Image (cartoon, coloured by chain):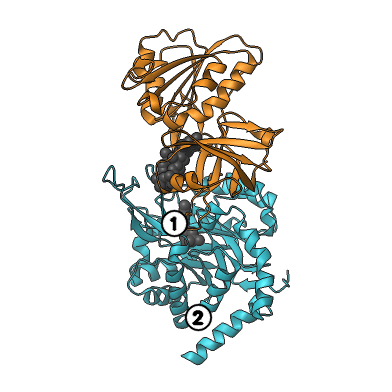
Chain colours: A orange, B cyan
Amino acid sequence: MLTKNNLEIAAQEELAPGIYRIVLHGEFDYAAVRPGCFVMLQLPDEAYQLRRPLAIAASNETQKTIALIYRVVGDGTRLLSKLTPGMLLSILGPLGNGFSLGADNSAEEVLLVGGGTGLPPLMMLAQALNEKGYAVTTAIGFRTASMAFGEKEFEHNGKLLLATDDGSKGFKGNVGELLAKQSVKKYAKVYACGPAGLLQMVQKRFAETETEIYLSLESRMACGVGACEGCVVSTKDGIFNKRVCLEGPVFDGREVIL
Amino acid sequence: MTIAGRLAVELPGLKLKNPVMPASGCFGFGDNRYAEMFDLNELGAIIIKAATLKQRDGNPVPRIAETKSGVLNAVGLQNPGVDVILHDKLPVLHKKYPELPVVANIAGATEAEYVKVAQKMSASGMVSALELNISCPNVHEGGMLFGTDPTTARRLTEAVKEVSQVPVYVKLSPNVTDIVEIAQAVAAGGADGLSMINTLLGMRIDLKTRKPILANKTGGLSGPGIKPIAVRMIYQVSRAVDLPIIAMGGIETADDVIEMYLAGASAVAIGTAHFHNPTACPDIIEALPRKLDELGISSLRDLITEVRSAQTNDN
Ligand SMILES: Cc1cc2nc3c(=O)[nH]c(=O)nc-3n(C[C@H](O)[C@H](O)[C@H](O)COP(=O)(O)OP(=O)(O)OC[C@H]3O[C@@H](n4cnc5c(N)ncnc54)[C@H](O)[C@@H]3O)c2cc1C
Ligand SMILES: Cc1cc2nc3c(=O)[nH]c(=O)nc-3n(C[C@H](O)[C@H](O)[C@H](O)COP(=O)(O)O)c2cc1C
């Protein structure tokens, strides 16, 4: 069920320079949360007319908490990073379709590919896939070692391939270059979230394979509920025929046009 | 059907149990997840997304940008076309909410297109009124061009009135030097009411890319930042033209609604407020009676009469 509730900030920490993890506590339809779903968060200042879309990085029904991980990129996320425990935030969600997980007890190999702020939804996904029995490999990239976060979570749920642009940790180069050195045919599914360039790379790299491709998109949006036609994307079936907020944010990589 | 209650208002074609309706383009055809958060039957009416003769794909993305106390949009009237709307969208809306009055926003690139859409929409039996959109700033043909020249605006109003089987509200553009002149022109063209205001043409530039944020470069500004402009324009127009006005432009609260009534409005539409408060409409409807008590207003109908007669004395 879609709700708009005030959740209390339970904790907030800086994971890496400019990357924050915020934990929110309160009433939410936890049962409806799937990896890849997001919320629209209202900043506590009426000058911000638009809620910020942020992916759900973790959800805990017993503790009644969700965690969001975000990068400070503008005024809104900067304000968010200054907020302290005890404050209330209006959260609209859960929104979006989420990733398609496939069958239980599958031993298939799957690949997760992420960059930058594309990582948060993949964390929840890695755990869900691992629990289902999939052999999860995650390939993620950062600018430099000090910017890295989420390694522990991904290692806990499978194998981690790490790249840094400057080679200060793991493979030297970006995730695309890292994957270029690997055989990817073994993967039954690939899930990607991150900047447009990364999604295009995945789309291209797997185009000739049998692998199922799931891409999670970002777009500037206003309503988050399929009402305003702000965040549209095109697929093979038509121009601007899907909304990232409603039919997405996850799309079939063989259908969606980036 | 008679309507009762202190929030009830009556406008041409619209007998409303309360004056609150979602504004065009901010609520689709009622086929969105806002409908999970409250019962649309609570609304006074609904104004649906613009309908054009043929399907429109709209503008490239990004279509949305934010500014302090406002939003810029350049959706570009994306809609599936009047036939699909009449075949797929309105019957669903009508079936789910049989009592909910529907106002159909219509747009076109040429007069002939407007006329065809008006004909089809108004003959459907599913809409109570038309909102003639002569004020969309986000399309490159038609749209706002019809709303910035009094002669063109009047001609179009006459043509649509000639074919429409339901009352016609003309939605005015604030992007003009003298809105009163346009309002008088469409009144002379036979408009049954006015709807005001549409968005103001604006732009935002990204400091890093040095390019406009919106792919369309310009967009329409809405939200609380434009409310004083809407109030001023409604105030001016209601003094010059004897037509009921559906007010919109930055309305977020019951206070805002009353302010619009004091300017000269007869009903209100809520757009941008949904984006931060998805239950803006039911929240306002719930808050209105208390606000009327507080201000010593017996009913909205009385308030309209009071404001209109005070205006006559002013003049
Ligand atoms: C479905 C979805 C999930 C997302 N998940 C995450 C996440 O888990 N972690 C994270 O760090 N970021 C995520 N983002 C991106 C995040 O929404 C933006 O970084 C954030 O809105 C920026 O807000 P701001 O006020 O700091 O930036 P400003 O640039 O000041 O924002 C101005 C406006 O532009 C919008 N905007 C700016 N950048 C983006 C963007 N990249 N995508 C969408 N809207 C944008 C803002 O929402 C706001 O409406 C997600 C985006 C989407 C669509
Ligand atoms: C995303 C968006 C889409 C809109 N689409 C339409 C439209 O299709 N037709 C129309 O007449 N007005 C459209 N409008 C204008 C609104 O109906 C309204 O006139 C304007 O936004 C001012 O009200 P507000 O400040 O409450 O949003 C749109 C506005 C927004 C924000």
> In x, y percent, where is residue B298?
69, 80
**Frontmost residue, A49 versus B126:** A49
Which disc is residue B123 wearing? none
Mark 2, residues whose alpha carbon is within 10 Å: few (<14), some, or many (≥20)?
A: some
> In x, y percent, where is residue A30?
67, 35
Q: Chain of mark 2?
A: B
Residue that carries the numbered disc 1 in the rendered image: B107
Mark yes or no: residue A173 visible: yes
Mark 1 sits near ligand 2, with its Cβ under 8 Å away:
yes
Quarter holding the C terminus of chain A?
top left
Q: Where, by quadrant of the figure, is residue B98 drawn?
A: bottom right
Residue at (44% x, 11% y) in the render: A209
Determine whether the residue tagged by mark 2 lies in a helix, strand or loop. loop
Which disc is residue B242 wearing? 2
Amino acid type of the residue that numbered disc 1 sits on in the rendered structure? Ala
Quarter holding the N terminus of chain A?
top right
